[in-house]
Each structure stands twice: as structure tokens, then as C-alpha cells.
Amino acid sequence: MITKYYKAAVGILLLFAVNTVSAQNVVNRIEVPEQEADTTVSTDPIVYKVGKSAKKTYAQERGMISRDASKTVFIPKGQWMLGGQVAWNQWNNDNLNYLVLKDINFEGYTFSAGPYFGYFFANNMAVGGRFSYKRYFFNLGEFDLNLGDDFNIGLKDLYYLQHNYESTVFVRSYLPLGNSKIFGLFGEFQLNYIFAEGKNSTGRDETFTGVYECTHNLEIGLGGGMVVFLADHVAAEVMLNVGGYRVKWGSQNTNNIEEGRITSSGANFKIDLFSIKFGLTYFL
């Protein structure tokens, strides 16, 4: 009987000793010996702080990703860029019928071109300027809107031509696609001044009416696009505007007799397909 109790007591003591050693081993794995200075050990995707304290940061406990850790230098600070942009759209319709639109005879085009430059004052961030010339031309020979026997509208001999001279100051930010050094996106904040002059007319011979217009535009706008490096220092880009806030003022003259004034302002945020431009940029 005594031997039975003796064996049980020995067994309990051995179990207690084993548990104590195991617990101590766990503590030894968790505790980090003190060092004179904190060091950083990276075990991606979590970065641990080792030293006097082995606690995780609040962001790590919440499962948040460090924004600074994901930054990639796409274009480094101190570089210059020089380039040019061009855009072209053309339409030519001869006796076209579409739903309620009949006998459409129309031709037109838009064209723009100009140089730009910039300096990278920080990684992936540039400030610069752009100058461009734009030309708009539309000539509607004939147009019929047929909504039934009792409602028909016909237009003909409508002519429109406009020249725009634009100066722009911009701040541009680049964002690489993943860790790529070739493909990237960019966004642009713009301050534009546009001087425009043009003329439009309707009719011919005795029914001719012509209007000359001269306007000034001041615009705060947003744009964006994509860039692809073709070589170490040469990249192609495509860009479009997405709107902004514009103030417009100017004057009109009709048949060299009547004078008119133009004043307007407003915000417009949408993708402008007429603003799509293709460019080639050289970085140095």
C-alpha cells in the first residue's frame, strides 16, 4: 500500500517538473535578451521590433499595411522630362441615316499639338509647363430630324472654325503598376489659360450670317493617363482630361454690326474623349 502511494507521489512530482521545464522553454522563446540598441528584423509580411520591447505596433495588431513600405521609385528626384503631345480626331459622313436622323452630310476634325517640360522635385512627383495649339473644324452640309409627319427639323450650311492657344502649369504624380519599372499611371493637377478665336456661319448668299468670337478661359482641371517606357530614357504616354472648374469671358461680333458679350462659369467632371492626347517623353 505504501509503495502504491509512493509511486503516485513520484509520478506527480515528475509531471510537475516536466511542465515547469516546458513552460520555461516557451518563456525563453518569447523573451528577447536585452540589447544596447533596438534593431529591426524583417520577416515579411510582418516587421518585428526587437530589443527592450517585443510588442507589435498598433498597425501590425490591426493587420494594416505600412504605406511607406509599399513605395516604389518609378522616376527619381532630380530628373528633367521633355516631350510633346498630339491628338487628332476626324469625321466624314455622306448621306448617312441613323434612326430619326436623316440625310446627314457632315465633316469635321479636331487637332492639337504642343511641347511640354517638367522637373521632378521629389520621387515620382514633377512640376512643369505645357503649351499647345488646338484647332476645331465642323461643316454640316445638311441634317434632318424626322419625328413624324407633323414634326420635322432641317438644318444646312452650318460652318464652325476655332483656334485655341493654351498655356498650362501642372503638378504630376506617377504610380508604378506593382513593382514594374516600365508601366505606370499618373495623375495631373492643371492650371490652364486658353485664348480662343473663331467664327461660325449659317446659310449662304442672301441668308448668310457670320459671327466672330474671341474668348478667354481660366481653368483648374484634373487629368490622368498611362506611361510606358520604351527605353531607359524614352517613354510613350496617353492622357485625357476629366474636367474641372472653368471661367470664360469674351466678345462676339455678328455681321460686323452687332456686338455681344460672353460670361460663363461652372464645374464639369467627366471623361472628355476629345481631350485624348498621345505623347513621347525624354527623361534626362
Image (cartoon, rainbow, N blue to C red):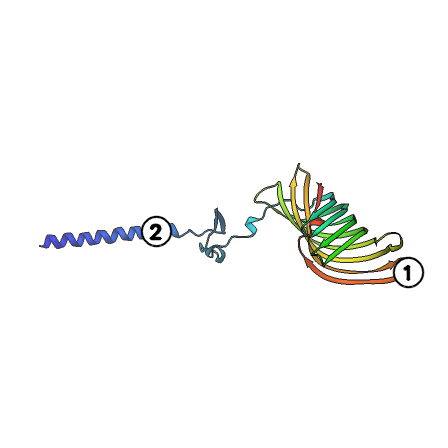
Q: Is residue 181 left or right of residue 45?
A: right
Look at label 1 and name its amino acid.
Ile
Furthest-left residue in view? Answer: 1
Residue 126 visible in rendering = no
Q: Amino acid at mark 2?
A: Val
- Pinpoint residue 207: horizontal percent, then vertical percent: 87, 55
Q: Which mark is residue 123?
A: none
According to the picture, the residue beneath numbered tag 1 turns out to be: 257
Camera-nearest residue between 25 and 143: 143
Of the pair 69 and 50, the residue shown nearer to us: 69
According to the picture, the residue beneath numbered tag 2 turns out to be 26
* Real-space CA distance between mark 2 and mark 1, rounded to the nearest whole angstrom: 97 Å
| Residue 186: percent from left, percent from top | 65, 48
Q: Judging from the image, what secondary structure is the residue with disc 1 in? A: loop
The quadrant of the picture occupied by the C terminus is top right
Give whichever of discs 2 and 1 has the lower sequence position: 2
Classify mark 2: helix, strand or loop: helix
Q: Residues within 10 Å of mark 1 (few under 14, many from 20)?
A: few
The picture places residue 241, in percent across and down from the top left corner, at 69, 52
